[in-house]
Amino acid sequence: MATAALIGTGFIGPVHIEALRRLGITVRGVLGSSAEKSQLAAQRWHLERAYRSLDELLADPQVDVVHITSPNRFHYEQALRALQAGKHVVCEKPLALNSQQSRELVQRARDSGKVCAVCYNIRFYPLCQEARQRIAAGQLGRIFHVVGSYQQDWLLYPSDFNWRVLAQEGGAARAIGDIGTHWLDLISFLMGQTVVSVCADLRTVWPTRRRPLGPTETFATKLQSGNAFAEVAVDTEDYGAVLLRFADGTPGVMVVSQVTAGAKNRLRWEIAGEKAALAWNSERPDELWLGYRDGPNQLLLRDPALLTEAARSYTDYPGGHAEGFPDTFKQLFRAVYSALEQGRPLPGLYPTFEDGHREIVLCEAILASHQQRRWIDVPQDL
């Protein structure tokens, strides 16, 4: 079985390690932003190797797969170098900071023949898989429209700071790029349709934020009373609303916010069709709402015995035993490492570099729409 190594020691790194270990996959070592961070992380997570550099990690002959969980600005170079070193790559989103970089990575991945995935994990909630199967089977009939949102509150206050709020660190689109792309990828996956045009309105609620003079962690308390800080100008959006048009003509609307009090990590979608409607909320992931005009509405609880055969393969516990965020990474990595076992990429099983590139192209179109105050067509050439 393939052996993995991890780049990054922040919030999402342990999520990768825990999911891989649940699948019986060996995680050999970790690379942090310094030799000291690598050593501390290796000790904390009981890993064999604490790499001092990317060169050292990539030169390790026992490492087959590189998991990239570092800050956004490093993804392109690290993914490129991992491919050049002959490694398979699993990269957190965004794949790169712009579409020129991501397009290059798509081509490099194709040329390499390696398994290359981007972590759009929300596809792997069992009831999202169930919704996809029902839509494909025609249970909703013709789709009339799609609405939804992704809302959080971890950047609610001007004293909340993270490197993501700076375009040079996280990319020009922040709320759209950080959480909006999860929603967009999921809805395209559910409907089997890509977004072809957008009309966007974005807003920066806090044009300046207080940056602590010490390090910060994602979702952690950003400013304790008495800590020193500096005022920093913010050049990314806190909120966005986007009108969408899908390839088959279906209209939709998405709202994203990282300043909605009480929304901890709430992705919601509702898909309305001529026969029925479906709705789902990530803060209640084991419930799928089914809406009807001429009969009682239903609430489908995640239970393998009640799901379609295809969706059933993405759930491992009986009904009433909650499966949530960590389980989506387990299912995603199961799909990726299944492709590794078969010795070739299997794009239908997991989000690929092409999917990662498409989301960056979408972000650029959304930013252009906001800046130009008009509908923008999304380039479709991959």
Image (tube, grey):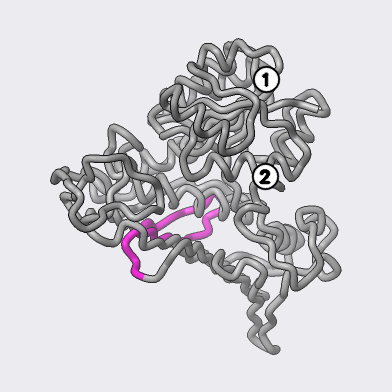
What residue is disc 2 on? 19
**Which of the pair 163/221 is nearer the observer?**
221
Are there few (<14), some (14-19), or many (20+) residues within 10 Å of tag 1? many
Q: Main secondary structure of the magenta part?
A: strand
The residue positioned 26% from the left and 53% from the top of the image is 223
**Which of the pair 8/381 is nearer the observer?**
8
**63 over 153 or under it: above or below:** above
The residue positioned 17% from the left and 46% from the top of the image is 229
The residue positioned 69% from the left and 35% from the top of the image is 347
Magenta stretch bounds: 242-261
What residue is disc 1 on? 63
Return the x and y of residue 281 as percentages of the image width and height. Answer: 55, 68
As helix, strand or loop, the secondary structure at mark 1 comes to loop
Q: Amino acid at mark 2?
A: Ala
Return the x and y of residue 65 as percentages of the image width and height. Answer: 66, 25
Q: CA distance from mark 1 to mark 2?
A: 17 Å
Q: Quadrant of residue 44?
A: top right
Give the mark nearest the N terminus, 1 or 2: 2
- Quadrant (top left, top right, bottom left, bottom right) of the N terminus: top right
The residue positioned 75% from the left and 34% from the top of the image is 25
Residue 307 seen in render: yes
Residue 380 seen in render: no
For the residues labelled 1 and 2, say whether their Cβ atoms are less than 8 Å apart. no
